[in-house]
Image: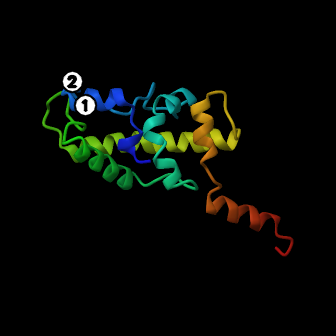
Amino acid sequence: MGMFEGLPLCAHNLIKNNEWKGGGIVRLDNALSRPSAGDVAINYHMLKPLIPFSPDKVCSGYFITDCLLGLDELFEGKLLVDAADGGKRKVDIAAEEAMKLKMLMGAVRALWRSSPSGQHPRVSELKGMLRPSPSRRRLKEEVSCPCH
């Protein structure tokens, strides 16, 4: 399931009926610190299609930017809208939102490393999609190898 299909019906209706006036599509309590489990849960619908695509590492910001630009096209250009009407380009809005999603994907991985399950069902579902990163797996194998 992609981002478009994964968004709730109310989000589709808000955007398609021209009620969406723009602004951030990814919500974070504090953009300066690591996102919390609450931030992950709030942004579940945006994260759910990205994590299975890249279960062993955090996606590239460029890839996520391209996904958001494609999502904007599916919404006929009505998703990535500059709320301040400052003439911000769609690619810049997409890049800003992509960096937030990248931070959230990193937070899901950090939460997963600390505990494979969680108290919130959506966070636990996202954690269940993750796999160990190839570099961490390699590092573990090198440390546990008796021949070194």
Q: Position of residue 1 (x, y in %)?
A: 44, 47
Circle on res. 84: none
Q: Position of residue 109 (x, y in %)?
A: 59, 45
Residue beneath disc 1: 15
Considering depth in this image, is 98 or 31 the residue closer to the camera?
98
Q: Is residue 13 above or below residue 112?
A: above
Who's the residue at 42% across and 31% down the image? 31
Q: Is residue 66 above or below residue 113?
A: below
Q: Quadrant of residue 121?
A: top right
Q: Is residue 62 above or below residue 106?
A: below
The answer to whether residue 76 is left or right of residue 56 is: left
Residue beneath disc 2: 19
Who's the residue at 28% across and 50% down the image? 70
At mark 2, the secondary structure is loop
Which amino acid, by three-letter code, is at mark 1? Ile
Q: Position of residue 42 (x, y in %)?
A: 47, 28
Who's the residue at 60% across and 47% down the image? 129
Who's the residue at 23% across and 29% down the image? 22
Q: Distance between the Cα atoms at labels 2 and 1?
A: 6 Å
At mark 1, the secondary structure is helix
For this orientation, the residue located farthest to the right is 146
Q: Is residue 133 above or below residue 68?
A: below
The answer to whether residue 136 is left or right of residue 82 is: right
